[in-house]
């Protein structure tokens, strides 16, 4: 019986063994599949986390929080170091932080991962330019422009660098070649306007800046360029109008340089009281006490409107701020003469021009004072010296003629003084 049952037992054992073996094999196969799936899942999770960190870094970068942006992009790269745009973003952040060499390394790594990355080319150009490697920078800008011929920014960057290098004709040709693509782009029109100014063609520059203004009416720098061209052309009313528009932009209302330009427009337009108000605001505001240019213009306006206390103060300020320049002494001398102290005025002029060349207006004033003091030979010398200094200005000639014809018995008027 045992002989009969044994094969069955053997068969059962064999079946059981096969089943166990199959089960073990099944378990082993299932384990390998689970491990691979887990690896893929972990990779996907790292990619998701990396992308999230990149988004956080980009948002912080756009908000100007560079330290947080750098931390987030470093986290992103730690999770997934093979993403080109992460290296580009890190390079941009480091560029803003002034860490140029590290920024360049990040951008070059982006190029290795993904050759011809447009942003990497452009920002490598910026870094090279800041490092004084102009030819290398130009190559990067031009490659970016070639890779994205529809984006004017890259071509403008290349043209502006050519302008800085003094290669004006090359810059113009470079932009003209692309005029069919973005000839009506505001940045291109603006750059061509810069070229026109450098080539002594303010008329064409104004046209180009006007075009740029129409194309980008919300860009304050275009207004600045247009104002510059209009000042060059003597179109002060148009310039003053555009200055008031410019001052409506955020950050421009209290820009000292813009207010100074407006004051000079108002002076040229003979709107002296308005100019005075602008200049008083400048000299009374923070930093105004040391603003020699504002005091210079305020002194000129004060003399024109017969504001003698302000003229005197402007003279004192300028003498203290610029002792080696003539204007402070000239203003003080004008005030002294106005108050009947001709001897003091002459002494002030002589003192002021020991270390500085006497300008035309000061020579005229010296001649007038010398004539008033009866120093007729000295007055004649001053008028002749002034005439030689500016032969196209008739005032010195007229004063000299008047002196010679008067028989030395007249009292001379300083030509810009309307009250004497």
Image (tube, helix red, strand yellow):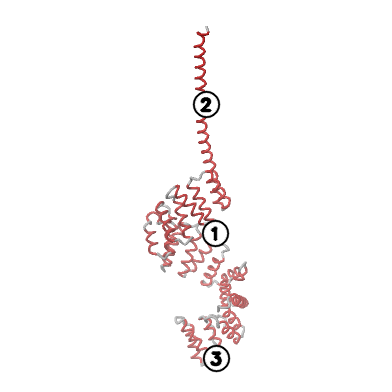
Residue 417: % across, % down: 55, 80
Figure quadrant of residue 299: bottom right
Q: Earlier in the sequence, mark 2 or mark 3?
A: 2
Figure quadrant of residue 327: bottom right
Name the residue at 52% across, 29% down: 31
Asked if residue 381 is positioned above or below residue 209 in the image, the reply reads: below
Residue lying furthest bottom: 407
Q: Nearer the viewer, residue 83 or 246?
A: 83
Q: Earlier in the sequence, mark 2 or mark 1?
A: 2
Residue 256: % across, % down: 57, 66
Q: Which mark is residue 27?
A: 2
Q: Earlier in the sequence, mark 1 or mark 3?
A: 1
Task: Report which residue position mark 1 lands on.
Answer: 249
Asked if residue 150 is positioned above or below residue 322 in the image, the reply reads: above
Name the residue at 37% across, 55% down: 180
Look at the numbered disc 1 and give the secondary structure of its residue: loop
- In the rendered structure, the answer to whether residue 212 lies left or right of residue 317 reads left
Look at the numbered disc 3 and give the secondary structure of its residue: loop
- Quick check: marks 2 and 1 in contact, CB under 8 Å? no
Q: Nearer the viewer, residue 4 or 344?
A: 4
Q: CA distance from mark 2 to mark 3?
A: 122 Å
């Amino acid at each position: 019986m045992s002989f009969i049952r044994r094969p069955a037992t053997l068969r059962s054992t064999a079946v059981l063994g096969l089943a166990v073996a199959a089960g073990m094999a099944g378990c082993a196969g299932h384990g390998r599949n689970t491990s691979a799936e887990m690896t893929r899942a972990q990779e996907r999770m790292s990619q998701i986390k990396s992308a999230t960190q990149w988004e956080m870094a980009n948002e912080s970068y756009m908000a100007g929080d560079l330290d947080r942006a750098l931390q987030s992009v470093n986290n992103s790269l730690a999770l997934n170091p093979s993403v080109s745009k992460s290296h580009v973003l890190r390079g941009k952040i480091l560029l803003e932080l002034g860490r140029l060499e590290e920024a360049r390394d990040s951008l070059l790594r982006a190029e290795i991962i993904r050759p011809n990355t447009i942003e990497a080319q452009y920002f490598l150009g910026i870094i090279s330019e800041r490092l004084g490697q102009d030819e290398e920078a130009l190559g990067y800008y031009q490659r970016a422009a070639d890779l994205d011929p529809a984006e004017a920014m890259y071509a403008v960057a290349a043209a502006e660098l050519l302008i800085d290098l003094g290669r004006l004709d090359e810059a113009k040709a470079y932009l003209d070649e692309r005029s069919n693509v973005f000839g009506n782009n505001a940045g291109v029109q603006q750059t061509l306007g810069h070229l026109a100014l450098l080539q002594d063609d303010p008329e064409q520059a104004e046209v180009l800046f006007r075009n740029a203004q129409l194309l980008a009416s919300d860009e304050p720098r275009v207004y600045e360029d247009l104002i510059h061209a209009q000042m060059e052309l003597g179109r002060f009313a148009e310039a003053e109008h555009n200055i008031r528009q410019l001052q409506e932009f955020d950050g421009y209302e209290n820009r000292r340089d813009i207010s100074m330009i407006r004051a000079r427009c108002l002076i040229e337009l003979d709107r002296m009281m308005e100019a005075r108000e602008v200049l008083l605001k400048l000299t009374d505001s923070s930093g105004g006490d040391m603003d020699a240019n504002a005091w210079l213009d305020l002194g000129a306006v004060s003399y024109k409107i017969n504001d003698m206390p302000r003229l005197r103060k402007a003279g004192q300020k300028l003498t203290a701020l610029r002792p080696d320049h003539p204007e402070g002494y000239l203003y003080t001398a004008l005030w002294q003469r106005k108050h009947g102290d001709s001897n003091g005025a002459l002494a002030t002029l002589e003192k002021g021009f020991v270390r500085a060349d006497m300008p035309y207006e000061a020579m005229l004033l010296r001649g007038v004072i010398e004539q008033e003091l009866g120093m007729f030979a000295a007055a004649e010398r001053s008028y002749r010296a002034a005439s030689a200094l500016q032969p196209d200005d008739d005032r010195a000639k007229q004063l000299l003629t008047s002196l010679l014809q008067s028989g030395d018995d007249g009292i001379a008027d300083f030509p810009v003084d309307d009250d004497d």
